[in-house]
Every structure is written in C-alpha cells, then in structure tokens.
Amino acid sequence: MFIHTNELGKFTHCLTDQRYFKFEQYQVSEELRNYHYQLHPIRSHD
C-alpha cells in the first residue's frame, strides 16, 4: 500500500484499530511524505 500524507499518526492509528490485516512499514521518504506498507491478512478461525 502506498500512502502520501501530512498526518501519518492519524493514518497509523486507523491501521492499528482495524482487525483485518497486520501492517509493516516497508519504505519511507519523509522528505516527500511518502510511505509504503506491506499488508498481511489476519485469518479468522470462525
């Protein structure tokens, strides 16, 4: 997932509040405010 934002804290807060996938930061360009994340689905055992 590619994100361009001036408010990274709000965005990552939304990511941590959901329960469908885990995420990890992959590449960052603070100067351009570009962030790449890898997403990993969370499998449900229902």
Image (cartoon, rainbow, N blue to C red):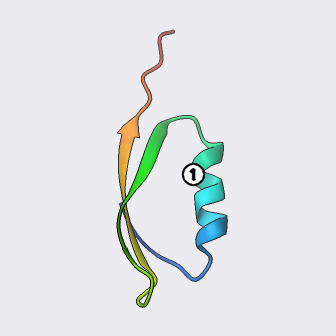
Q: Is residue 8 left or right of residue 45?
A: right
Q: Identify whether 35 is placed above or below 20.
A: below
Q: Which residue lies furthest to the top in this view?
A: 46
Total marks placed: 1
Q: Which of 41 and 31 is in front in this view?
A: 31
Q: Residue at x 58, y 71 (%)?
A: 8
Q: Residue at x 41, y 89 (%)?
A: 32
Q: Identify whether 31 is placed above or below 39.
A: below
**Quadrant in the picture for residue 13:** bottom right
Name the quadrant of the N terminus: bottom left
**Quadrant in the picture for residue 2:** bottom left
The percent coordinates of residue 24 (x first, y second) are 42, 51
Q: Is residue 2 left or right of residue 5?
A: left
Q: Residue at x 52, y 79 (%)?
A: 5
Q: Identify whether 35 is placed above or below 18.
A: below
Q: Tag 1's secondary structure?
A: helix
Amino acid at the residue labelled 1 = Leu
Q: Residue at x 63, y 54 (%)?
A: 14
Q: Nearer the viewer, residue 46 or 9?
A: 9
Q: Name the residue under label 1.
A: 15
The percent coordinates of residue 20 (x first, y second) are 50, 35
The percent coordinates of residue 42 (x first, y second) are 44, 29
The percent coordinates of residue 28 (x first, y second) are 38, 73
Q: In this view, does 16 lie to the left or right of 1?
A: right
Tell me the crowding category of disc 1: few under 14, some 14 to 19, or many 20 or more residues within 10 angstroms, Cα based. Answer: some
Q: Which residue lies furthest to the bottom in this view?
A: 31
